[in-house]
């Protein structure tokens, strides 16, 4: 018999997960985007240097994801305890995010790549252990769909950091003040979520499969290695497919609309799209094929990238920002749920592998854009070519999910 008050009891868990991802992703990773125009304007960093900082962060994200993926294997080889206290790692990652964000306020440019790399590691740790632990606890409480709410967090962090950056630009304050502001905001949010991330709050599950399956009929279906490989590769394409726009959107918009007063609102609009998309994903009926939902999400993001190409105007950038954001964390939620369906007993490791592949795409994006800008006749053409490549990769990823659905149709249980 289901517990009628389970959703209300589970809500604090979902909200804590939301806040943790707002800190780790919305601030730890994406606060750099709205601050980049400030840093470029004060010449504290060049476009090539900005690409280095972005790639350092994404490389750290990749390293953190790989470390989480292979943690059970490493622990076994070294004779350590194989199980991980997920909430403790979340707390540690949140504290690290606060310290590293504050560190970017220091006038030590040589240290910035290292700080951004470490922030990427912390982001991956918080993302994976928050996703793994919170989704597991919500499934054990019988409300797995509530897990989509935690992915509202990155959007909330993006909106907060974007609006704060807009205010800083209006006040003509240095970028260092922005990093200090975001570090203090991250500290305040961490304090709000701290008490929830306690392993003693966890609910033990009778079986691993029951906890991981989330009631999706075929809890441990037979899936070929090729099928899982395509799933991982398709997820990785989303990394490079969105990152060029997500990293350079404020810069691209400033080049196309140098006199517009609305430039600093495109990034917060992206964050609003992220939040709306995550809430929408939580409202979808259970039982649908997640691969087809992923294909639809990729198509929406491709349309968002194309909107900035077809119409580099205020309306085009606004529509592109919204469409790019709508499926951003919905993609993550659907992919993580699909992994839990396919590999319930190794879910965290497979989540880490997908996240690592996503990280590879993110690493490739910024230097690709910077290289194309450097080799093109002008920056606008270089960015346009980068966006064309990104759009094509998202379309390819959508097609791969459709192929996967044809190869391995869901069995109704």
Image (spheres, rainbow, N blue to C red):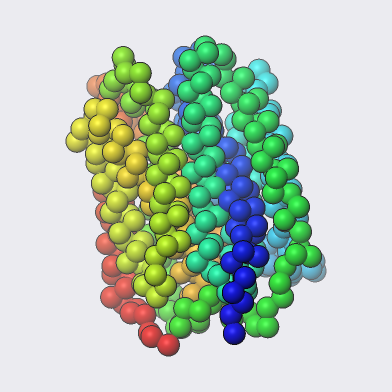
Q: Choose between 374 and 237: the one closer to the eye.
A: 237
In this picture, residue 177 sits left or right of residue 386: right
Q: Residue at x 28, y 48 (%)?
A: 302
Instruction: Relative to 5, say whether 366 is above or below.
Output: above
Quadrant of the drawing holding the C terminus? bottom left
Residue 3 position, x and y percent, is: 61, 77
Instruction: Relative to 344, say whether 88 is above or below.
Output: above
Residue 293 position, x and y percent, is: 34, 64
Q: Residue 271: which quarter of the image? A: top left
Decide if residue 18 is in sight here.
yes
Residue 345 position, x and y percent, is: 59, 76
In this picture, residue 120 sits left or right of residue 261: right
Residue 117 position, x and y percent, is: 61, 38
Instruction: Relative to 9, say whether 329 is above or below.
Output: above
Q: Residue at x 45, y 44 (%)?
A: 362
Decide if residue 129 is in sight here.
no
Quadrant of the drawing holding the N terminus? bottom right
In this view, the residue farthest toward the front is: 4
Q: Residue at x 57, y 44 (%)?
A: 22
Q: Choose between 233 and 410: the one closer to the eye.
A: 410
């Amino acid at each position: 018999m289901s517990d009628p008050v389970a959703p209300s009891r589970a809500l604090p868990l979902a909200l804590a997960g939301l806040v943790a991802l707002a800190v780790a992703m919305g601030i730890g990773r994406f606060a750099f985007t709205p601050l980049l125009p400030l840093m470029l304007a004060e010449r504290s960093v060049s476009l090539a240097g900005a690409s280095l900082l972005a790639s350092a962060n994404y490389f750290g994200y990749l390293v953190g994801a790989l470390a989480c993926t292979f943690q059970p294997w490493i622990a076994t080889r070294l004779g350590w305890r194989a199980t991980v206290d997920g909430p403790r790692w979340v707390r540690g990652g949140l504290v690290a995010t606060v310290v590293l964000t504050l560190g970017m306020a220091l006038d030590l440019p040589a240290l910035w790549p290292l700080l951004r790399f470490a922030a990427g590691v912390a982001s991956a740790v918080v993302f994976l252990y928050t996703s793994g632990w919170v989704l597991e606890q919500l499934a054990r409480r019988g409300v797995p769909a509530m897990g989509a709410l935690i992915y509202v967090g990155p959007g909330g962090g993006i909106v907060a950091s974007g609006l704060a950056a807009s205010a800083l630009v209006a006040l003509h304050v240095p970028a260092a003040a922005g990093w200090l502001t975001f570090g203090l905001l991250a500290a305040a949010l961490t304090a709000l979520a701290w008490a929830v991330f306690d392993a003693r709050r966890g609910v033990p599950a009778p079986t691993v499969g029951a906890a991981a399956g989330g009631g999706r009929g075929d809890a441990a279906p037979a899936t070929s290695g090729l099928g899982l490989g395509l799933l991982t590769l398709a997820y990785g394409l989303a990394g490079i497919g969105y990152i060029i726009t997500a990293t350079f959107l404020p810069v691209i918009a400033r080049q196309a609309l140098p006199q517009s007063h609305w430039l600093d609102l495109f990034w917060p609009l992206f964050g609003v799209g992220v939040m709306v998309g995550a809430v929408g994903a939580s409202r979808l009926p259970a039982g649908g094929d997640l691969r087809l939902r992923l294909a639809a999400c990729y198509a929406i993001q491709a349309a968002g990238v194309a909107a900035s190409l077809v119409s580099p105007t205020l309306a085009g950038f606004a529509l592109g920002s919204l469409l790019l954001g709508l499926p951003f964390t919905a993609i993550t939620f659907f992919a993580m749920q699909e992994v839990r369906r396919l590999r319930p007993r190794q879910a965290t490791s497979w989540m880490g592998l997908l996240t690592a592949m996503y990280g590879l795409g993110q690493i490739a994006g910024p230097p690709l854009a910077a290289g194309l800008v450097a080799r093109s006749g002008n920056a606008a053409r270089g960015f346009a070519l980068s966006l064309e490549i990104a759009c094509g990769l998202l379309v390819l990823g959508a097609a791969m999910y459709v192929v996967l659905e044809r190869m391995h149709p869901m069995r109704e249980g």
